[in-house]
Image: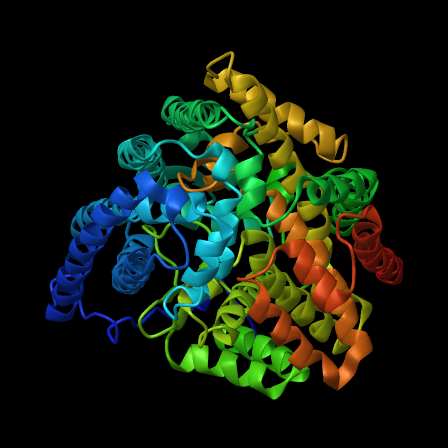
Amino acid sequence: MITQATSDNFTGPTWDNSQEYESIACGKFEKDLIKSREQIEHLRQAAQIAEALLTCVASLSEKSVEAIDIVSKAFSCNDTFETLALNLNTYINCILSLDGANKEARQMQGTLQNLFTEAAEAMQPVHQLLITADDNFLAHCLMRETIVPHQFAIKQRRWFKPHLLTLPEETLSTRLALNGPTAWGTLYTNISTSLQCKVETAQGIQTMGVARTAGLLKSEKRDERKAAYNAINSAWRTQQESCAAVLNSLSGWRLDLYKRRSNSRELHFLDTSLHAACIQRETLEAMMLAVNEAKDMGRKALQLRARALKIDKMGPWDLFAPPPSFNSQSQGETLQTFEDGIEAVRASFAEVDGEMGHFVAKMAKEKWIEASVGDRKRPGAYCTSFRKSRSPLVYMTYRGSQDEIGTLAHELGHAFHYWTMRDLHPVQTACPMTLAETASIFAETLVNDKLSERCKTPQEMLSTMWGDISNIDSLLLNIPARFAFEKELYEKRDSKIFNPTDLCELMRNSWETYYGDALSEMDDMFWASKLHFHMAGSTFYNFPYTFGYLFSLGIYAQSKLMGSQFYPSYTALLRDTGCMTAEDLAQKHLGVDIKNPHFWRASIAIARTKLALFENILRDCRL
């Protein structure tokens, strides 16, 4: 059923997390918290012995049974701790996503952050032991059942050996981070969830949260989109000094630490991001080369969307605009209920394999999807999970737009990815962000294409393809502009502290480099409003999106060629994403070298074909 109405009538469902915990005060929550603390005590006992063994690490061998026992015990305790603490943390984050001002949840968030720090400190001597020990000792450690699942993670840590500090320094760094980058990231989150925007509407000025205001950026009416955009940026300008302090502090902290780690081999500010993404520098350079060659394509996507909207040029407030309505009697955007949206995703997933369709139905039935509208909700969308029950969760705000159906598909793609790995050891499900976007963007592309196949008129095709075309300008222009901004910030941060004016100029220049004249003006406050620049645990939370987009297009092309053989191959690839580098994964499952720009150009060519089809549709619609 497709209905004409205002978007607030189309809000989605709310989570039901009571099967995990009824409340922060419930006995089950308190029991898991107590057990978490007990595991840290066990970890500390193991850590004391591991620290002593570091003094004789050169003499350790396969005969060092005591040392292997200690390593095995430590991993077992840490696995138990993480299962409990991450479960608690997910529950708290769910509460804060719905209401960032919840005092009890904020307090518990601080308690859990401290526990994670204590556990990390306790594991540091164990990690140091495995990083510095010889290959023979490591091989015998990896024969223990408790350590085997950690093989890839240990291998990744051993790459870090030239940058390792002394144990006291590593422990101090971990402890100080709690009141350093972690605190700065928390400050930004608190600002974003409490920030209020004053939006000029036909009914007068209305005050609402950032997430609700951001929803108006998807309004059919351009004046509403612009009013929302101006309100969001005006609100962030009131906090620009704080946001600048967050960015300066996070980048300064990291650069100082990178310098300290560069005694044996230089640690470049990109190295930690690339290592976390499980890709090599050559792969990033090959992808960015292909992306920079395709700037004209991203700009053309914007120009075609402006043509469809019958405006001269897109403004930054138009980037999330819905497709044009062709119903002259329409009183607003054509919206779909959440039930219709989830059914569209389910049916599309089912066409790949019935199991995928059943999974979407289960997500809805189990109330694992949060899609309601609320003033205190944090902006954005994400997928998370409960470690104990291995239940995936999706978070978003749903108002019925076509774009939000795409977001729903995207996050359910993430959830399905996790679902395929739920029987693996938890450490093997922790895939890097580059590969974490594979299933989500595949799902989004799949749903858009399946909906396109059912279209009966050029107008329906235009509306359905709108999300695909939006992805082209977003992932070939916006994401690279974010990367360029952050890269220049780190290149210059060593010699200066950036004030808000500097950051606005830096962001404006980055946007101009990619958007060129395809936008009427640049969003110079984007550095403040975008969460990803202010995350304590991650840097360069940008290029993996473009990686995932182009990588998934290559996989999607394979789905067309392989037919019924695709699904088992696809799930096998997803299951390997937590235990292989991106280069090895691509070689094993696709037989391609992603360090070669040819792979990325081939994926961009798929997107270019979509763009040409969209241009033909505009002609058929006489636009």
Question: Residue shown at 71%/75% (left/top)?
Answer: 450
Identify the image quadrant of the N terminus.
Answer: bottom right
Question: Residue shown at 20%/50% (left/top)?
Answer: 44
Q: Is residue 117 left or right of residue 348?
A: left
Q: In this view, does 257 lie to the left or right of 126?
A: right
Residue 35, position in %: x, y? 16, 63
Circle count:
0
**In the figure, 258 relative to 454: above or below?**
above
Q: Quadrant of residue 623?
A: bottom right
Question: Residue shown at 59%/19% (left/top)?
Answer: 505
Q: Is residue 135 left or right of residue 550?
A: left
Q: Residue furthest top?
A: 495
Residue 236, position in %: x, y? 42, 31
Asked if residue 314 shows in the view, the reply is yes
User: Closest to the observer: 244 or 36?
Assistant: 36
User: Closest to the observer: 60 or 550?
Assistant: 60
Asked if residue 116 shows in the view, the reply is no
Q: How is the image coloured?
A: rainbow
Residue 612, position in %: x, y? 87, 56
Q: Is residue 172 left or right of residue 277?
A: left
**In the figure, 580 relative to 247: above or below?**
below
Q: In which quarter of the image is residue 368?
A: bottom left
Residue 30, position in %: x, y? 12, 63
User: Closest to the observer: 4 or 79?
Assistant: 79
User: Closest to the observer: 378 or 18?
Assistant: 18
**In the figure, 561 relative to 552: above or below?**
below
Question: Residue shown at 68%/70% (left/top)?
Answer: 446
